Image (spheres, rainbow, N blue to C red):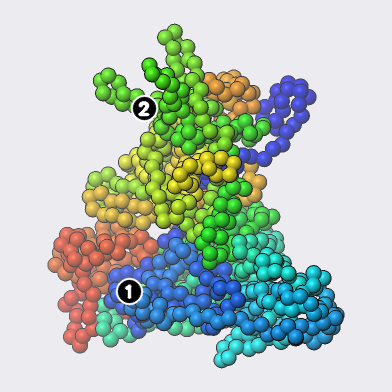
Amino acid sequence: MTGIRIGCGEFAPGGEPITVPNLPVPVPDVVVPSGGNNRPRDLPPFIPPVGGGGGGGEESWKCVIISPGVLDYVPPPAGFYYVNGFYRKCYKCDGLINPSTGQANPSPGEVGCSYTTLQECQANCTNPIAPIEDPRGPGEIPTGGGGGVGGGGTTTGPRGTTGPATGGPGNRGYRCQQTVTICLEDIGKPQNQQRVLSISHNCVACGGYSSNNSRSLRPEGPPRPSRGGNTATEIYSTECAFKSAADCRSSCPPGPITAKFVTSCEEPVNTVQYDPPSNSAGTRYEISVINIEESGQIATNVAPIRGTSTSKSEIYHNTYNFFQVTEKEPGTPTKVSLGSYQNVFTNQVATPIANLVNRSNTSLPWRERDLFSLRDEHIEASLSPQLRYAFESIHQIGGQLVGKQKFIDVVRKHLVTGTMDEFDPQFYIDVARNQSKDKRVKYVKSEDSEISHRAALGLVSTQSVVADPNAFTNLRKRQMRRQRRFNTDVAANCNVETFTEQTSLYLTDAGIPVETLDGDSFSVPTGDGDGYYMDIQQLDGTHVPIITNSDYSSTYYVPPETRINALSLINVDSSYNIFASSLENKNELVTGDAGASALKPLYFKLDLESVTYETTEDPLVSKYKGRYTVEYDQDEIDTHTINNGIAITRVNLDYRDPIYRYILDSGRFDLTLNDINLSRISNIKDLQGGVRFSRNIPFGLVIVPVRGSKFNPFNGFSDLLQFGDVCTRFISLVPSIDTFDNKLEVSDLKGSNLFYEENGALKVGLVEPNDSQNVVYKFDPNAEKLTKTFYTNGDYSTSTSPVSAYGISYMIREVIDYIIDTHNPEEVLWYDIIRRMPLNKIGEYLYDNNPELVSYLERGYRGGLLIKSAINTIKTLDDKVLNDDNKVIIKKEDR
């Protein structure tokens, strides 16, 4: 085949079709709100639960049992075990997402939230340890193929290992001992049906070492029930088959661990290997358990239970206050038929779900139980089998499971805020189907910080990508030309001769700084296209390149999936964080504010001179910060995308989120992220191989307003950080789950052939070689994938109406301002504010609020109106309650 063909595979003159995988990109193509704040918050005006700690706004703490595999779990030292039979840790009872676990802390008033200080909790939340005694002395070692306990020539080891039982006296050695804690009622069941709470491994000295001894684990005897508990312990050992302790530790356990782990014997089994329902679109998947210290376990954490019963407070008036109270026992929920959302739920759903759906977007009276009686197990038990499988199997980039709890919180928020029409179950089912053959990983972390850091650096060293296009061929080479590393990261410099010496002029990230005779200063950027060079225009108008010296051939970047996994190993947040401020008196708290003036995709360029980094507590991690500014000129945008096409990230934001309006109005925002870049190493070239690691901050961002699951799968929203004439919000972003191994796209921008796109051009800039197969990426603000982003009830549309008041801004502008204008009181009860809000508006408030702003409101921040709670009294409080008006949803008789 001779000649050139474009668009039908890849052909080169005299060559044959070439199929190559895409280049690993330096930044994710799409990021979405993380949903890290997707738990209802406990704050006024809802009175905390009766009978628990933390009442009245005081802090409380709870001692929580932590299961193996949870991020905060700390295994006992080698050769020891926890006397309690488990590991415990104190958590604050605030119901917020804990960044170290990724799960919600206990809720205020939850059973066990009885300690008023962390120190008091820690004093009663100890983890005593004791040495594990060798149950068999050297003289008890079976000899001559006795077959271990109970005789027999071959035994079945734990978790599927088998091997002959041999032995014999001889030299001292070591054996691998496995201790398995199971549920008491599972004694006698087959191993694949036993619920496992923990598995630990130790190397024990023994006599009779022989290299021919079996390294398979065998039971040492029947399970031993715990004293007064509901668990039992099984002990398995290899024969004395290891010459040294180091040899034993490297092979203990001798094979992979597969078990059905639970965090409590009251919980259903959560399997490592999962078979989807027969009528689902999924297939069986397995998780590769990677233990960075050669042993460990995995388990699934369970979020705190939320539920309510009728409050009977001795302090607060039970009619003229609203309460959030929790049930001590979950109970079995009643199930009822639900005629809507049958592609989400089964035919029978838990009653709290039906109550929320039936009151959704209505002005019907509601009770606290409608908001707070919905528990996680209600949602999970009511989901369709296909959706439940999808929630359990979907993984993030890098292969780690998202976890079903995250998705249960998504459904909860949709139910409480009345946005179930925006929930697209087919999206999650399709993602699970596309990921069905992907590799999943679970890292079991070490209590030793250095081991964790070595494991993280191991990922970085083996999976990073060299930033030199010449290191690649074909498509990957052409894709690499469409991204840049920072000039300072590749040590770009020019040779400069002065009257006295020849020296090197190092470029800043923005280029070469220049100051004119008039005192103006600016930077001359590097030229377009491949290569780090300066584009110099001569007197005759011709352009010539001045090639810089640089280390880009030995500079590497870390792909997003590697960055996420490496940071997770050392418990560092991997999210991308945007901070944006409103213009003065143009925000959601301003009376009469109309909201965003438009809903359209926006293109932002990174201001290279704004990029800074700060050190963290971890010497290997830095936090980057950069300022992004909007660009409307399409020619400027085209130039920027041609140079940085695969280093540009799309950012999806809920169209109701005020942070989108801030960004639209101000045309700027800041982004921060953590990364492993070794910036605190004195000479990075001292590393093995003399390599550099470049920073992984996107060179451009496309902000897209969206609605619905496909574009906001975690149903995330920003947080209000500061309020006043200027408001500031923050949002945490993570890579989209709408991805899978070997996905074809590398950029969310439109990819095309340079020759066709630029009227026969064969290269970009002065240095890049001519190539008829060169690729470019373009931003088209009218592209369907950037505009058809609003989902409702199965349909995607290109437009919707802006929302001006949501969450706490609705409470302030639509209720508090209304009360001031209509009744003009000096003081009002929270009761009168809450009873004028529909159920779903209260739901919005629980997710979008600011505790400091609520405190200010109580003290007269809005129009001088004081807001109080009602104390319990024998006196009538009717004179404290405002008269009913057209906004009232809940009347006294509804209480």
Q: Is residue 180 left or right of residue 884?
A: right
Q: Is residue 237 above or below residue 392?
A: below
- Figure quadrant of the C terminus: bottom left
Q: Is 476 situated above or below 327?
A: above
Task: Say which amino acid is labelled 2.
Answer: Pro
- Residue 50, can we see it? yes
Q: Nearer the viewer, residue 787 or 631?
A: 631
Quadrant housing the N terminus: top right
Q: Position of residue 461 (x, y in %)?
A: 59, 47
How far across and how far down the image is residue 489, in percent?
Answer: 48, 37
Q: In x, y percent, where is residue 532?
A: 50, 27
Q: What residue is drawn where x is 75% and y is 86%?
A: 140
Q: Residue at x 53, y 56 (%)?
A: 453
Q: Quadrant of residue 112?
A: bottom left
To which residue does mark 2 refer?
A: 513
Residue 391 in sight: no
Residue 811 rendering spot, x and y as whole percentages? 29, 62
Name the mark nearer the viewer: 2 or 1. 2
Where is 415 relative to 172, above or below? above
Q: Earlier in the sequence, mark 2 or mark 1?
A: 1
Separation (CA) of disc 2 from disc 1 = 53 Å
- Say which residue label 1 marks: 59
Few, some or many residues within 10 Å of mark 1 (<14, 14–19, 20+) = some
